[in-house]
Image (cartoon, rainbow, N blue to C red):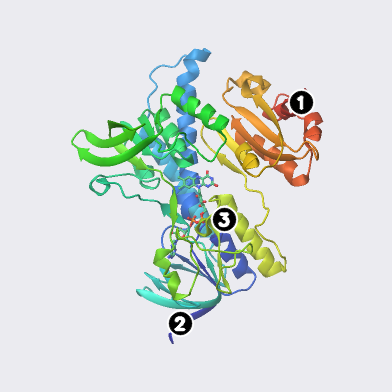
């Protein structure tokens, strides 16, 4: 260890959704704590993930609603999109969230926040490159701690495609800084980020093409969900090319040219902008994990046990960097598990925790528990309850009848095993079922429960009534 190494009780690398609250909690408990962040405080969610995208999606929904207004008897003239204003509101929301996170880290005596990039130099030592509070602005400092928490997250995956280096491609980060609306946005990938971005930009006025190698979008989901959502997006005018591989990309004066193979045939398409949406890769290389002997999997994710402990005693990994479900609420729950175990003597683990999620397309897709695909693969027997949104009174009244909901039920125990709600407020509806699953509330109780009329929630009566037939 260097003579000028500063010793801490805990070091947190990355101010993501788990790291930031963990730093505060440990410091407030009296641990001498350092939080190291190379970029903006708050990590992906606040700065380039959930917050900016959901803000933009809300404005795209507004544009869609206004566009639908004449058909509903509300005449509007002269509607047009001011992209710069929409982006400015997004920036305001992001800045407000980020400032809130920064302020939350102030005035905690045991907490030191360092701005710089950290990497391991030994088993429990790190160097931080960049301006630092400890060094008074020097280029590098050395820190050590018995407990180190890695919350460095992921960044967009950049694939190897011939010609890619020669065109100004976009990622989910850089697309959020566009100065003007793309004329024709081509998106590579048919996953959650691709669909949210595609619908958002289509609704703001861009032409959108989605290219997907496999036979469908959101391949992890059940086929009926894939099909229903695919139809919604196609009806809105999004061009979805499945079974399509990209061979080469080039830039010309009139835009970007993609040489594709679709169902074995050579096809060429042109667009103004090209977004890579092929998933996210862990930011572990720059950490020099080999310096501390950390076990990393073939994709670069840090291996942890069910208590989030790595193979090096005292070093933990939280959030996206450990692989598995990459959601803000999972990173946050990792923090909850760790603080309970470390400060309150609990023995919580990630095993069997619920992993709900919501894709913020319109309609939303709320998901919890087993899908039909997963139940079949695991040989779990189930009964299926389904209800189209056209049978939901609230949806009919609001005019938002796209989608359907489905729930898997264990007929013997009557417990709800999983659900998918593709519908307006699908995420909120899913959460009601999640609560029922957590509390062991059986489907027949939900079927007969009193819900206020005419909420979307009341449709859960009808969903489970279908099992009586
Ligand atoms: C476009 C988009 C939309 C999304 N939408 C949703 C959504 O709707 N709902 C949802 O739940 N999730 C969503 N996600 C995923 C979500 O943002 C992440 O799962 C979440 O932010 C958790 O991240 P984390 O805590 O693992 O780390 P992050 O938030 O990624 O934070 C990691 C931090 O570590 C810093 N760092 C990295 N390396 C170093 C280093 N060596 N030294 C110092 N600092 C370092 C980084 O700068 C970063 O600030 C979305 C993601 C994207 C990209």
Quadrant including the N terminus: bottom left
Q: Residue at x 47, y 22 (%)?
A: 66
Q: Is residue 328 above or below residue 105?
A: above
Q: Residue at x 20, y 33 (%)?
A: 254
- Of the numbered discs 2 and 3, the one sitting upstream in the chain is 2
Q: Residue at x 56, y 70 (%)?
A: 311
Q: Is mark 3 within 8 Å of ligand 1?
A: yes
Closer to viewer: mark 2 or mark 3: 3
The quadrant holding residue 67 is: top left
- Residue sitting at the far bottom: 3
Label 1 and label 2: CA atoms lie apart by 66 Å
Tell me the number on the disc at residue 331.
Answer: 3
Pointer 2 with pointer 3, Cβ within 8 A: no
Tell me the number on the disc at residue 51.
Answer: none
Find residue 287 and report its horizontal and vertical position in percent: 43, 68
Identify the residue under disc 2.
5
Tell me the number on the disc at residue 465.
Answer: 1
Mark 2 residue element: loop
Work out whether residue 176 or residue 94 is closer to the camera in this orientation and state it.
176
Label 2 and label 3: CA atoms lie apart by 29 Å
Mark 3 residue element: helix
Find residue 279 and report its horizontal and vertical position in percent: 44, 47
Q: Is mark 2 within 8 Å of ligand 1?
A: no
Q: Is residue 1 visible?
A: yes
Closer to viewer: mark 1 or mark 2: 1
């Amino acid at each position: 260890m260097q003579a000028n190494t500063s010793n801490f009780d805990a070091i947190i690398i990355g101010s993501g959704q788990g790291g930031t609250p963990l730093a505060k909690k440990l410091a407030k408990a009296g641990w001498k704590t350092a939080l190291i962040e190379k970029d903006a405080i708050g990590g992906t969610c606040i700065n380039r993930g959930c917050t900016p995208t959901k803000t933009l999606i809300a404005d795209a929904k507004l544009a869609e609603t206004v566009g639908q207004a004449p058909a509903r008897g509300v005449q509007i003239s002269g509607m047009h999109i001011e992209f710069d204003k929409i982006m400015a509101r997004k920036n305001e929301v992001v800045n407000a969230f980020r400032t809130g996170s920064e302020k939350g880290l102030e005035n905690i005596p045991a907490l030191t926040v360092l701005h710089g990039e950290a990497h391991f130099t030994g088993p429990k030592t790190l160097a931080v490159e960049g301006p630092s509070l400890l060094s008074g602005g020097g280029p590098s400092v050395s820190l050590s701690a018995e407990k180190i928490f890695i919350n460095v997250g992921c960044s967009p995956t950049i694939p190897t495609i011939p010609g890619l280096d020669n065109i100004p491609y976009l990622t989910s980060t850089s697309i959020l800084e566009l100065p003007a609306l793309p004329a024709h946005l081509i998106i590579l990938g048919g996953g959650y980020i691709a669909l949210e971005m595609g619908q958002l930009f289509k609704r703001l006025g861009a032409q959108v093409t989605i290219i997907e190698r496999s036979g469908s979008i959101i391949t992890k989901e059940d086929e009926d969900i894939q099909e229903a959502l695919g139809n919604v997006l196609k009806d809105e005018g999004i061009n979805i090319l499945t079974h399509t591989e990209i061979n080469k990309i080039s830039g010309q004066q009139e835009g970007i040219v993609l040489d594709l193979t679709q169902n074995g045939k050579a096809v060429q398409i042109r667009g103004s902008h090209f977004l890579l949406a092929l998933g996210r890769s862990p930011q572990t290389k720059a950490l020099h994990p080999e310096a501390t002997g950390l076990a990393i999997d073939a994709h670069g994710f840090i291996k942890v046990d069910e208590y989030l402990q790595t193979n090096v005693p005292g070093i933990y990994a939280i959030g996206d960097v450990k692989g598995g479900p990459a959601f803000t609420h999972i990173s946050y729950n990792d923090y909850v598990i760790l603080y309970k175990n470390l400060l309150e003597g609990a023995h919580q683990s990630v095993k069997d925790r619920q992993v709900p999620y919501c894709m913020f397309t319109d309609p939303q897709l709320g998901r919890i528990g087993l899908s039909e695909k997963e139940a079949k693969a695991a040989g779990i027997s189930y009964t299926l309850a389904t209800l189209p949104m056209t049978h939901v009174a609230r949806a009919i009244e609001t005019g938002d009848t796209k989608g359907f909901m489905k729930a898997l039920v264990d007929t013997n125990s009557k417990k709800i095993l999983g659900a998918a709600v593709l519908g307006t407020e699908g995420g909120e509806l899913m959460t009601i079922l999640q609560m029922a699953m957590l509390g062991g509330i059986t489907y027949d109780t939900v079927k007969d429960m009193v819900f206020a009329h005419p909420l979307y929630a009341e449709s859960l009566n009808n969903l489970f009534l279908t099992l009586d037939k």
